[in-house]
Image (spheres, rainbow, N blue to C red):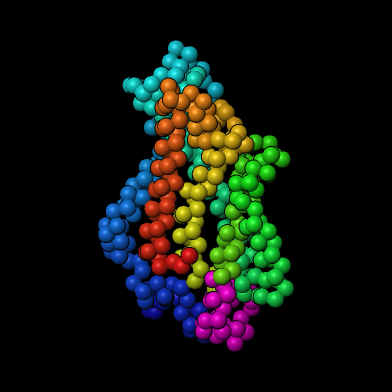
């Protein structure tokens, strides 16, 4: 039985190329992770963030503190047992709220990428492969979005919408799809000159078949790498919106709003800002390290 996946006319597609290049048997993946301690560190950090978000209900010592709970007997306490990260101005445990804030941030990041990536990839494929007027119109629209600073665009949209989690997802998605359009557009332009694409065209394969069955699989490594890198940046942008009062609103726990609230009381109540800020740093840093490792494993071009 043949182990390769073939495209039109027997030309090898992406799966075959990965086998030729030796990527990724598990042994090679582990070798890369062990050779680069930073990649291993990224894996540990991301695992900690994801597990904290998923199992927050079981890890958090005070699960009810994720909502509108008031405990003035323990308000604004410095870190001590059982409040290992201290408490906020109404007595809620910061450690518990950070765990639930991770859940909110990851949900936002996953939903944003789940919407933005298909939109951006589809537009990039059509523009890169079809060329002509389709390329001109689609890429000029993309350039308009890329010309606006991402945070400014998100702030403008959130200024028009009610500051909720759903609207925050919409605002961040509106600024994120053009980056995938530009990436896939460049990849599609180079891939459409390859022999396997020309062979598919010669035997009469439809344009949709060529784009989604021949070209797209060869773009997957770069798309996956960028998605991993972007997940940390989506969390950072969402936290920035909340910091400015345009994102998730209290009492829902959010890392950005927690930093903004605690910044007013520096340096006396330092824990109000330091621990949520470190939580953002851990998430962004971890996803960036994993993205770099994934780029090396898959041999992705950025």
Give the farthest residue toward the top.
73
User: Where residue 78 sits in the image (x, y, percent)?
Assistant: 38, 21
Residue 15 position (above or below residue 274): below
Nearest the eye: 299 or 100: 299
User: Where residue 271 sits in the image (x, y, percent)?
Assistant: 41, 27
Residue 157 visible, this orientation: yes
Tell me the quarter of the picture where residue 279 sits.
top left
Give the farthest residue toward the bottom.
202
Residue ID at (46%, 26%):
266
Nearest the eye: 122 or 289: 289
**Per the image, is 78 magenta?**
no
Which span of residues is magenta-colored?
Answer: 187-214
Residue ID at (42%, 50%):
287
Residue 5 left/right relative to 37: right
The quadrant of the picture occupied by the N terminus is bottom left
**Per the image, is 194 magenta?**
yes
Residue 213 visible, this orientation: no
Residue ID at (43%, 25%):
267
Residue 6 position (above or below residue 246): below
* Count of marks, rendered view: 0
């Amino acid at each position: 039985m043949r182990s390769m996946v073939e495209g039109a006319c027997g030309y090898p597609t992406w799966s075959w190329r990965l086998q030729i290049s030796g990527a990724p048997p598990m042994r090679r993946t582990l070798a890369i992770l062990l050779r680069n301690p930073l990649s291993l560190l990224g894996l540990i950090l991301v695992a900690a963030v994801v597990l904290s978000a998923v199992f927050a209900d079981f890890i958090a010592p005070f699960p009810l503190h994720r909502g509108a709970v008031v405990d003035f007997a323990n308000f604004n306490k410095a870190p001590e047992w059982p409040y290992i990260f201290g408490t906020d101005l109404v007595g809620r445990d910061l450690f518990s709220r950070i765990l639930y804030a991770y859940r909110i941030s990851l949900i936002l990041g996953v939903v944003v990428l789940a919407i933005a990536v298909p939109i951006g990839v589809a537009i990039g494929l059509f523009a890169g492969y079809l060329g002509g007027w389709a390329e001109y119109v689609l890429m000029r629209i993309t350039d308009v979005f890329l010309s606006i600073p991402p945070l400014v665009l998100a702030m403008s949209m959130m200024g028009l919408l009610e500051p909720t989690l759903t609207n925050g997802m919409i605002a961040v998605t509106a600024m994120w799809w053009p980056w995938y359009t530009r990436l896939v557009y460049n990849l599609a332009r180079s891939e459409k000159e390859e022999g396997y694409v020309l062979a598919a065209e010669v035997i009469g394969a439809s344009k949709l078949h060529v784009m989604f069955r021949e070209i797209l699989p060869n773009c997957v490594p770069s798309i996956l790498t960028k998605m991993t890198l972007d997940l940390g940046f989506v969390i950072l942008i969402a936290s920035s919106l909340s910091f400015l009062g345009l994102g998730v609103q209290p009492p829902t726990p959010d890392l950005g709003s927690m930093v903004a609230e605690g910044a007013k009381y520096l340096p006396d109540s330092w824990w109000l800002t330091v621990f949520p800020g470190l939580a953002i740093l851990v998430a962004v840093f971890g996803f960036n390290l994993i993205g770099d490792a994934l780029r090396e494993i898959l041999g992705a071009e950025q």
